[in-house]
């Protein structure tokens, strides 16, 4: 009875912002972002270029404008929204699963593993395809390693898993340092540093073709399980009393969120803070009910990373790495969360 009342309380605490707003704002921002950059394109020209592929519109724009909008900015804008949405929903799911508002998608070492894979690819091959593939593979291997370590000793499975993630993350972080130490300081080392700082400069339709299905499928699984994450956030005993197999559910969520995170980081490098900050912004707007929070996190994450990338590529002549901008926003907000929650689930 108590668990049912807690679930009802979660449902009632959904407030404030309509699904229409969260749907229409990213679309407006997407169109506006296609015109932003060191080669500005007016908004009506952007709509005309996009519409010309659906309706018979007489061209009033130059070939350069069409190339910039369709071949350079559109894949970058789509990738920014896709990665932002994926990291945000993965962060919100992990926070609900671990019942801790200070958890991020890299909690199980996936980000460090992905970073090592990318550095290894830069050191051994230097080809973008090999770098991305190795980054994704080692991100998955890092979580598998955390799982295997967590099973070495009995105890609280979630606690052991988090501790194993810390161990794996530290191990791969050390390996990243080793890769940088032995790398060629003229070419390989700068490439590693730039990749680890995160960027969408190399966005292409080819990356979207392989990365989008992984993020979309993983995010769809999390969306289908969002009401069950509500039950898990109440505690394991309460979830089991409602007839839920918590072990299987927990690993389905972890696998889905891991694939989303690994694919996102493999395509863009380490972009921090999105999976930590955005779910909290979502809770402030729509409340803690994951049935509403996860879709809201998708919308907010897509907008946040797209706005950040717009600033990164348009603010200065040299592109600013994404991790710098996200940290400038995320670190003060993280300090605020620590002050408000003391590290506890609110």
Image: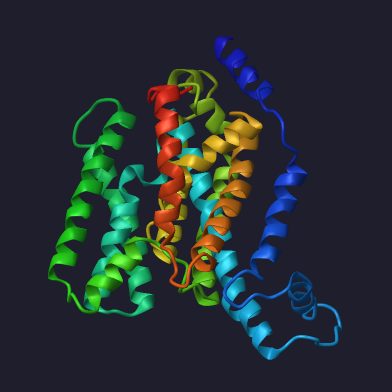
Total numbered badges shown on the rendered structure: 0
Res. 252 visible in picture:
no
Question: Which residue is farthest bottom?
Answer: 63
Q: State the residue in front, 297 or 235.
A: 297
Q: Residue at left 23%, top 47%?
A: 168
Residue placed most toward the observer, 98 or 75: 75
Please, which residue is most extreme toward the front here? 316
Residue at the spot 46% in from the left edge and 74% down from the top edge? 202
- From the top left corner, tell me how far across and down residue 44 is, in percent: 79, 72
Name the outermost residue toward the top: 1
In this picture, residue 268 sits left or right of residue 141: right
Name the image quarter holding residue 288: top right
How are the colours assigned in the image?
Answer: rainbow
Residue 316, image x and y in percent?
48, 68
Q: Is residue 236 left or right of residue 81?
A: left
In the displayed structure, 137 sits above or below 224; it is below
Q: Nearer the viewer, residue 265 or 215?
A: 265
Percent across and percent down for residue 90 are 48, 45
Q: Quadrant of the N terminus?
A: top right
> Residue 286, position in %: x, y?
65, 33
Q: At x 43% / y 64%, what residue is drawn?
A: 320
In the image, residue 87 sits, relative to residue 80, either above or below, namely above
Give me the residue at 45% from left, 23% from top: 340
Say if residue 222 shows up in the picture: yes
């Amino acid at each position: 009875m108590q668990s049912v009342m807690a679930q009802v309380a979660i449902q009632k605490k959904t407030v404030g912002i309509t699904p229409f707003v969260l749907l229409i704002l990213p679309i407006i921002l997407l169109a506006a972002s296609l015109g932003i950059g060191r080669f500005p394109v007016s908004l009506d020209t952007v709509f005309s270029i996009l519409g010309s592929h659906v309706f018979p519109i007489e061209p009033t724009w130059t070939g350069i404008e069409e190339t910039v909008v369709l071949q350079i900015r559109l894949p970058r804008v789509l990738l920014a929204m896709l990665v932002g949405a994926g990291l945000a929903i993965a962060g919100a799911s992990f926070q609900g699963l671990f019942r801790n508002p200070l958890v991020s998608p890299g909690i199980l070492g996936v980000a460090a593993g992905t970073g090592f894979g990318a550095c290894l690819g830069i050191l051994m091959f230097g080809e973008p395809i090999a770098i991305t593939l190795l980054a994704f593979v080692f991100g998955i291997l890092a979580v598998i390693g955390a799982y295997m370590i967590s099973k070495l000793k009995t105890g609280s499975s979630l606690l052991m898993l988090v501790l194993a993630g810390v161990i794996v993350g530290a191990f791969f972080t050390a390996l990243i340092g080793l890769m940088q130490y032995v790398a060629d300081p003229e070419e390989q080392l700068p490439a590693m540093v730039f990749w680890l700082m995160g960027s969408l400069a190399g966005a292409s339709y080819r990356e979207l073709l392989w990365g989008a299905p992984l993020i979309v499928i993983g995010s769809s699984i999390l969306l289908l399980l969002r009401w069950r994450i509500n039950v898990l956030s109440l505690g394991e005993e309460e979830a089991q009393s409602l007839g839920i197999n918590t072990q299987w559910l927990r690993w389905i969520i972890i696998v889905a969120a891991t694939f989303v995170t690994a694919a996102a980081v493999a395509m863009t490098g380490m972009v921090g803070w999105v999976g930590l900050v955005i779910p909290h912004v979502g809770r402030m707007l729509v409340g803690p009910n994951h049935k509403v929070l996860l879709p809201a996190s998708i919308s907010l994450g897509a907008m946040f990373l797209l706005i950040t990338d717009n600033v990164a590529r348009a603010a200065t002549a040299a592109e600013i790495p994404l991790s710098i901008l996200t940290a400038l926003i995320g670190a003060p907000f993280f300090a605020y969360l620590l002050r408000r929650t003391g590290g506890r689930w609110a």
